[in-house]
Amino acid sequence: MSHEVEDETTVNESYSVTVPAAVRRAAGVEAGDKLRWHVDDDGALSVKLVKQQYGAFSKLDPVDTGEPTDAAEDHDLIAGDY
């Protein structure tokens, strides 16, 4: 059985929108999730829910490269260094 939910919202002056509660509940939208926007050649707008992944790397085993590593020094951009 399909259960369609439709609602509308207004784009505010800063171009933000609020996802209506009924839509959030029906789609399972949670804080941290992303909405992927798509406009096709005919100008039709669609939105896809991209769920936030928690613990995506928690089951990975460390790899011994044979060399000591320091993520802070090895990384291209260190937070706080500009």
Image (cartoon, helix red, strand yellow):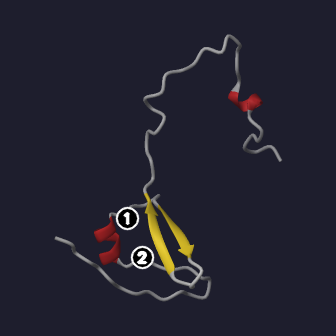
SS for callout 1:
loop
The residue nearer to you, when weighing 76 against 44, is 44
From the viewer's perspective, tell me whether residue 28 is left or right of residue 15.
Answer: left
Q: Tell me where residue 82 appears, x and y as whole percent.
A: 83, 47
Distance from the alpha carbon under mark 2 to that under mark 1: 9 Å
Q: Tell me where residue 4 appears, x and y as whole percent.
A: 26, 78
Residue at 43 percent of width and 56 percent of height: 51
Quickly name the residue at label 2. 19
Residue type, mark 2 in image: Val
Above or below, 72 against 2 in this view is above
Above or below, 6 against 50 in this view is below
Q: Are marks 2 and 1 in contact (CB under 8 Å)?
A: yes
At label 2, counting other C-alpha atoms closer than 10 Å, the crowd grade (few under 14, some 14-19, many 20 or more) is some
The residue nearer to you, when weighing 35 against 68, is 35
From the viewer's perspective, tell me whether residue 81 is left or right of residue 62.
Answer: right
From the viewer's perspective, tell me whether residue 70 is left or right of residue 21.
Answer: right
At label 1, counting other C-alpha atoms closer than 10 Å, the crowd grade (few under 14, some 14-19, many 20 or more) is some
Residue at 48 percent of width and 89 percent of height: 10
From the viewer's perspective, tell me whether residue 25 is left or right of residue 53.
Answer: left
SS for callout 2:
loop
Q: Kindly give the residue lying farthest to the left in the view shown.
A: 1
Label disc, if present, on residue 29 of the rendered structure: 1
Above or below, 5 against 31 in this view is below
Label disc, if present, on residue 17 of the rendered structure: none
Residue type, mark 1 in image: Val
Residue at 22 percent of width and 75 percent of height: 3
Q: Kindly give the residue lying farthest to the top in the view shown.
A: 66
Q: Which quarter of the figure is the N terminus placed in?
A: bottom left
Q: Earlier in the sequence, mark 2 or mark 1?
A: 2
Residue at 55 percent of width and 87 percent of height: 12
